[in-house]
Amino acid sequence: MNLPTQLCGPSIAFDDVSLRLGGTQVLDNVSFSVPAGALHCLIGPNGGGKTSLVRALLGQMPHTGSIRLQGSASPLGYVPQLLDFDRNVPMTVDDVMALLSQRKPAFLGPSRRARAAYAKALARTGVGELGATAFGSLSGGQRQRVLLAQAISPMPRLLILDEPTAGIDEAGVNLVEGLIAELNATGVTVLWINHDLEQVRRIAHSVTLINQQVLFHGPADQLDSHLESLR
């Protein structure tokens, strides 16, 4: 896959973002910023509000406060933690790529150019041979690789990841980390929800620890000293 020299991803600013679901306060005055071109990880306990914050950024959840993007975020790539998909639906990997990636109705079929782009993206995530395979028959790790492939076709300026390496073997983790680092090196802004602190230490430029509120925000190399101070 040919990568552009500079994609100039956007910066992101969260200002006093609060969110309630029913009677539960999910986010409480969350404020922090992600610089343009950063590889930034969101960490914190399950139920701490990380995915809700990302969904608010995507316009999928009502919230108070503001979320601002400075610079173009289009194209935007998103890899959800789980895809709500009926395994009995007779769709191939190529069908799923067309459904999730193209803008015209999927029943019209992808163009030749789009098919070539999908094939390159699938090859880039290590599942290039699975295009004709039923998506419902894939393992969890294979599905995550397909979802990552659709997120980078077309190449995004902003890439949002929700546990993209969950259920992937070590070789797959290394492949995904290398790919994300390569994209980030071209200027793509990456916002990555992550539970694996060892992985965060390897890849992140900066980190925000959230449990309803921001408990830490800063360079990744300062995270350990902060966690130590909490013990």
Image: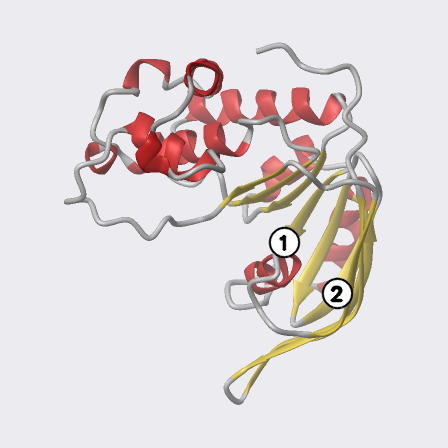
Residue 14 sits in quarter: bottom right
Residue 13 sits in quarter: bottom right
Which quadrant of the figure contains the C terminus?
Answer: bottom right
Q: CA distance from mark 2 to mark 1?
A: 10 Å
Q: Amino acid at mark 2?
A: Leu
Task: Please name whichever residue, 220 or 115, is drawn nearer the observer in this view of the structure.
Answer: 115
Indicate the position of residue 203 as horizontal and vertical percent values: 67, 32
Residue found at the far front of this picture: 108
Which quadrant of the figure contains the N terminus?
Answer: top right
Do the residues bearing badges 2 and 1 touch, measured as CB atoms within 8 Å?
no
- At 66% from the left and 74% from the top, the residue drawn is 63
- At 63% from the left and 10% from the top, the residue drawn is 2
Query: Would residue 84 be seen by someone viewing this image from the given angle?
Result: yes
The crowding category of the residue bearing disc 1, from other C-alpha atoms within 10 Å (few below 14, some 14 to 19, many at least 20), is: many
Residue found at the far top of this picture: 2
Q: Which mark is residue 91?
A: none
Indicate the position of residue 208 as horizontal and vertical percent values: 73, 54
Taking 133 as reference, is 197 above or below it? below
Residue found at the far bottom of this picture: 23
Drawn side of residue 36 relative to residue 89, left or right? right
Task: Please name whichever residue, 126 or 170, is drawn nearer the observer in this view of the structure.
Answer: 126
The colour scheme used to paint the residues is secondary structure
Q: Amino acid at mark 1?
A: Ile
**Residue where numbered disc 1 is placed:** 43
Indicate the position of residue 78 as horizontal and vertical percent values: 55, 42
Taking 146 as reference, is 26 above or below it? below
The crowding category of the residue bearing disc 2, from other C-alpha atoms within 10 Å (few below 14, some 14 to 19, many at least 20), is: few
**Residue where numbered disc 2 is placed:** 215
Q: Secondary structure at mark 1?
A: strand
Among the two numbered marks 2 and 1 on one chain, the one whose residue lies closer to the N terminus: 1
Indicate the position of residue 159 as horizontal and vertical percent values: 63, 38
Drawn side of residue 138 relative to residue 17, left or right? left
